[in-house]
Each structure stands twice: as structure tokens, then as C-alpha cells.
Amino acid sequence: MAFTRKRQREQQLQLYSRERFSLLLLNLEEYYFEQHTAHHIQHKGSQKERKIRGSLKICSKSVIFEPDAISQPIIKIPLRDCIKIGKHGENEANRHFAKYVTVYFIKEHNIVAPYKIERGTMEYVFELDVSGKVEDVVETLLQLHRASCLDKLGDQTAMITAILQSRLARTSFDKNRFQSVSEKLHMECKAEMVTPLVTNPGHACVTDTTLYFQPLNGYPKPVVQIMLQDIRRIYKRRHGLMPLGLEVFCTEDDLCSDIYLKFYERQDRDDLYFYIATYLEHHVPERTAEGYTLQWQRGLLSNYQYLLHLNSLADRSCSDLSQYPVFPWVIGDYSSSELDLSNPETFRDLSKPVGALNQERLERLLTRYQEMPEPRFMYGSHYSSPGYVLFYLVRIAPEYMLCLQNGRFDNADRMFNSIAETWKNCLDGATDFKELIPEFYGDDVSFLVNSLKLDLGKRQGGQLVNDVELPPWARSPEDFLQKSRAALESEHVSEHLHEWIDLVFGYKQQGRDAVGAHNVFHPLTYEGGVDLNSIEDPDEKVAMLTQILEFGQTPRQLFVTPHPRRITPKFKSLSQPSSYNASTADSPVSPGEESFEDLTEESRTLAWNSTLKMFSKESRMLQRSISFSNMALSSCLLLPGDATVISSSWDNNIYFYSIAFGRRQDTLMGHDDAVSKICWHDNRLYSASWDSTVKVWSGVPAEMPCARKQHFELLAELEHDVSVDTISLNAAGTLLASGTKEGTVTIWDLTTATLLHQIPCHEGTVGDSAFSPDSRHVLSTGADSHLNVIDVQTGMLISSLTADEPQRCFLWDGNSVVSGSQSGELLVWDLLGGRVSKRIQGHAGAVTCMWMNEQCSNVITGGEDRQIMFWKLQY
């Protein structure tokens, strides 16, 4: 479960160590500056005088004393309520005192409970262990007290910010914290580490091996460090609707990051991101929504996994409760004794936002909307906010709720008491439009069970708030989560999930389509809804930021056109493919004795799974299996010398794999979208991409496992109007033919990087292209089932043949053409006669790739049936 894993990681950072103090004891937007070992002097000057040893924390808006003895409560004293601060007596140089009118007592006996409050004139005396620091502490407290007592909130924030920036300017990252004396510092800047509800200021720096963050206050530990080689994902984030965040993950699929940093300057954020991407050898770049969509459509990602990825791409993070991942209500029946997932009536209508599910309520909201002055909105509250997240998670995150609500739990009758009651209120409530969180579809039931034995109050009927009441069809919390997950992955939800994605992440999120879908929220919740930098009035700016953080934020829009439906079942049956048994004795192409199938259990996976596999022709066995990322590989080739394999991927990268050393030796990150095809000639790499470019690179990958990453030199960039799906080179490497998704074949002169001809010759995507051995002609196939021959010198279409179905790939030896069809057939073409001379049944699914040796004597084909076949040409 996302929030539980986040807390476990915070525990590793000692946020939940033996110390009872945590940043959650601070107010929102408050900073913890420093601490001093001290004694609290009780009953000063009387026979009952006693000293309680502990730690005195100086914060921007309060003083917090944490006694060593857990039986004693933590004392929190707001500076704004202080009457007087000063040294205590002339002869007691190590003591300072303060008079207050409001004091909070927290976690007595280490029990998490609502804060106890005392009001009245009280004097507190603290004795520091180091007497020489009293004057500095008193001076600091007086300065912070002046800031807290300013009338305007904007002035308070400005003065506290100035104090913070002054402290940061007087310090820098302690280089003695480097793991090695040989580390080279590349960048250092001021930043804040973000955790739910609170941030911690300090210094971030990156070396050639490690990312560091050193908190200004040394809390929760003197330095946080992450090895660059461990990083798997890194995302630029918006924080408070500002592009200032950076989130780093050391896992591939976990929703919770290892560190989330917020910067004061956007340039610092961008520079740090650049350095990490540059010096990280195994860096995995940001994924695209389109790439994940393709995987989801084909059933390679579950609905749950896909929603997690979309949330992450849309700036949702479990480190930021104002942008916590959002999931939909999918079940609409919480009263039946059995849950029937085959009945459409069991499910919520995913084409409508929660606020539009009740027609009667919607009509009232629309009436108000039409009468409202600009800027108008339909819903006065959001579907995801810190309050809603903690409403669901209060049983495992009570301290967060107390932090958000000034030391109080919510009214017992407004707590998360029942699944059915919560759903009913979302349908009928005048201001309740909340969706769910990932925990409802995970496997950790702790948020449904009061395992901490918290005193959450009594309801009006007298019953205590304890575990969450489950619907009748759930036998236990575990059963509830299992059935909820089954509903999310059900056929009905799979067929309609794209409609909800349109509302939350897609084209119905904003504009006229949002109005038509009754999906309009307050303008401050949208990215770009307000420019905080343009607001000059400090009070208005602080109020605006507070509203943004507490009200909730709409995810970043990922799609501007209707989201596609899911086109395949959730899981495909990966049964053993049948053996090839077609008789081709009279064919010019016949299968050789070496034909083989996927014979090992390990290799029974779809080609979409991003795995590069190497087979032995002699043993017919799988020799190597290498996974580069979690996205599909699009093409691969073997470099001269048979020592290195290059693979391109939908994750925008090109990977170099050393056969000799059995490891990935290089990664080229040169495109902004999926790489569709690669070619190699004379130490030059040619890469085609969906980012509408073909790029020419110069460089030879490193051959030693210890070698540094090569920086490939970009020699040329061939611009196209749309995605490029295929490329091919002539024998001399002087000409390149590219095919696009809109059916255009373009011929380029590589010696000058200029366009020679642009021929729109297909309706639909160009599937494959190749030059004739003499470079005089280009042959192309397309989704329109045509085979077109183009004259290179004139750019004219000189011949066009039509097949019964699309031909996915082909080979051309100058005389004959052998093509692989959508149905799995191999077709031998007579180009001069304009006909198919032979048909050979080859694969049980589409033929996806073909290869022929230089002697034109052997052919290898691969198909969607997961078979690789060897053929011998017979003339």
C-alpha cells in the first residue's frame, strides 16, 4: 500500500525513531531550525522544583520541548501567544524564560491522541546545557516572535522566509559527508526535502557518484544519500502548481519515491535533473503516457498498474497529499450480500464524475453554475485533497490528521466509518465528490482496521469509532480488497476505464469538453490556473498558496484527444505454439532442418516484454535473456565483429549489449519518443523515432565493462512532419529511405543530409522499405496492402502491386521479393509480372521480421506466434 510504504521509508530515515518528535508536530508551512539539549525547570524557586531533561527545538512559529522520559508530554508553545521572552536572572546565565497564554501537550506516555491545550498566563523556564548559547537562543526567539506577531500573514511569511534564506546562505553542504575523497562535486544548491504535509530545508548536491541532501537542522539524519547507480526513475514535478519539484525512485514500479526535493529556483531543479541524467550510467528516462497506453491496450499492464503510471506521469505523488494518487470508485453496489461482477448494474458509471452521478443533485449544481459570475465552477470541493486522503488513512496516519487539523481528529460522525455510508454521501452530499486512493485496490488492509487502538471518539448513537464497516458482500477486510481489485480488473471496467481517464487525465478535464461532461472544478485547482509569481501582494499570495495546497489539485493533463479503448483481454493465454508442418518441397523457399520454436519455459513471453533473447542455432536452446526496461523493444541488430548487440525501445532509448561480457555496456538517450528502427553502417548509427526525426550518430560503444559511457556525437537530424516508423540504407550508406505513419516515403542524401524526394505513396503507415542492391529503386510496403517501387533518381512511383492483406516486412535480393504477411504467409513475388508466384504457410500469426545472409542463401523469420524459423533458398 502506497502510504504504508511511504511511512516505512520515513522510518528508515528515522522520522519515526525513538524520538517522539517529528516534523508533523509543526504547523503547516513551518520550519524546524535547530535544537539544544536542555532542562525544563518546573516549580522554579519552590521546594517542588524539578528538572526534566530533554531537547529544546526552535521552530519558525513555535518552541517545542521533547522530554527524554516518554511519560512526560511534549510541550509545544506557539510564539505568537508569547507575552515575554528573555534570560532568567542575572546569575543564571544558562537559563531563559518565557511567558505564554497557550500551551499544547502532546503524546504523553507516547500515545497518539488529540492535543491537550492549556490557556492562561504561564511561565516556562529552560536551562541549556551550554550556557554560552543562551543569548543567541533568546535573540533568535525574539526575532521569530516579532515575525509571528506581525498583523498580516504575508508579512509573517516574508520575514520567516528571509530568516530561513539567511541561515541557508551562511551554510553550505559539508563535503566531509562525501562517501569518498575522490568524489567530484558537480552542483550544489538550496532545496527542501518534501514529505507529506511538511518540508525540510537544506542543501542538495550531486557528485559523479551520489545525490546528497543535508538538512539544515540535521533532522531526520545528518545527510540523506542516494547512489546514482541505484536510481531507476526521475521525474520533474510541480509543487504548489509551480515547476520546482524533483522526485527520484530507486525502483521500477513502486509508487513511493526515495526522495522528493523542492527547489527555490526552477533552474536549480532543471540543472540537477540534467546532471543526474548525464552522470547516471543506468539512468531510465521519464516514460510517456502514450507508451504506457500501448502496453495497457495490449493487456501487458493491468488496470491498476496503468492508473499508477498515469498518476505518476500527472505529478501525483504519495509525498504530496495535495497531489496524492487518485483512483476511481468502480463498484456501485455496497448493499447486496453477493457481489456480481457479471452484472453491469454492479458498477459505477465511469463516464461521469462523482458529482454528476446523482441527477437531482447535478441539476441543483448546474442551476448554481449558470447563475455564478466568472470564473464559474460546478463543484465547490475537489475529488482529491489532503483532507480526503487522510479521511481514508486516519487509522494508519493519525499524526498526519492531527497536523492537518491543528491537533484534533474530525467529528466522530464525519470519520471514515463505513464503506456504504461514504459511497452514499458521495452520491447525495451537497459538497462531497471525492474519489478513492490506490489503497482500496492494494493488498494491505491496515487502513481499514484500527490496529493502533486509537480513540477516535463516539458517534451520536454511542458506538465507538473502530474498524471500518464493510459491505455485506465482504467477509473480511482482505476479502473486501480482493473483490475490489477483481472489480477494477473486470471486463466491464476494462471496457469503460478510458471514459474515466478522459475526465481525470484527458481531454474532458478542461475546456468545453469539461463543461459538456459536467466536470468543472475551481480554476485554482488546474495547472496554469494562477501564476503565483505575478501576485505582488504577499497576503494574497500566501492565501492563494494555502488554498491551492489544502483544496486539492487537478492532475496534469496527459491527453488532449479521446483516450483509446482497451483492445485486448487482460491476460493472453501463452500456450505452447504448434510445430511447423507445412509441405514446401516444390517451393523456392523451404524450411531447413534447423527450424525451431520457443522450447524453454523461460522464453514463453510476448515480444512486448522488452526482453532481448539469444538462441543457439545448433542446440535450439535459449542462451541469453536480457531485460533493458519495462517497455517493448522495437528492433535490434548485431554489430560487425559479433561482439555487440544494439536494441531500440519504446522507452526512447537505444541499448548496447556486450555479448562477451554479458552486460549492458551503454545507453543512448537521444529521442523524445519511442525509437522505431535502427540501422548501422561504417561506425554510424541511424535511429528513427516517433518524435518525427531520424538521427545520425557517430561513435563506437565501449567494449570494456569498466569503460566510461560514450558520448555519441549527433552528426545530422532529418526532420519529418510526423512519426517515422521505418528506415533503410543503401549498400554504400549514402542514401536513406524513411517511411512515416501517414504513408510518405522520403529519400535522403546522407552525404549532405538533404532531402531528395518525398513521395506520398501509401494510405496508412509504411511498414517496411529497402533499396535494391544497385540503389536505383526503393521498395516499400504499407498498411494499405500495397508494394510500391520508387525510382531513386526521379522520385517517381513506377510500379504498385496489391496484396490480399498488409505485408509487414520483406526481403529483396535484386531479383525476387519474399514478403511476410499479416496472416503468417510468406509470399514470393514476380515484380515484373506483377503477381505472387508462390505462397508458403510459415507462421501461425503475423510475420514481424525477416533477415537474409549476404550470400542470399539463408533466411530467418520471426512471427507473433513466438516462433523463429530458418529457411534455405532453393533456386
Image (tube, grey):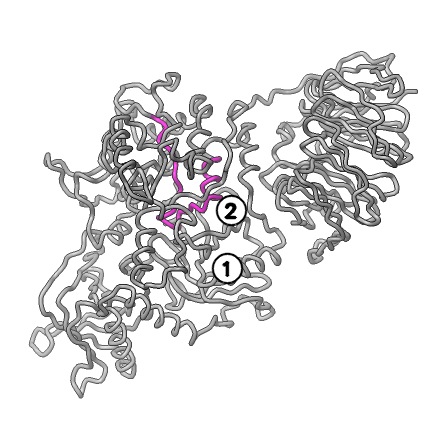
The earlier-in-sequence mark between 1 and 2 is 2
Q: Label for residue 251?
A: 2
* Residue 469 visible in the current orientation: no
Q: Is residue 700 left or right of residue 134?
A: right
Under mark 2, the amino acid is: Thr
| Residue 386 in the image, given as x and y percentages of width and height | 31, 47
Q: Position of residue 114 (x, y in %)?
A: 18, 52
Magenta span? 306-331
Which residue ends up furthest to the left in the rendered image?
A: 47
Residue 641, picture quadrant: top right
Q: Kindly identify the amino acid type of the residue bearing the numbered disc 1.
A: Arg
- Quadrant for the C terminus, please: top right
Residue 282 in percent (x, y) is at 61, 51
Residue 660 appearing in the image: yes
Q: Secondary structure at mark 1?
A: helix
Which residue is disc 1 drawn over?
269
Q: Is residue 490 above or below residue 391?
A: above
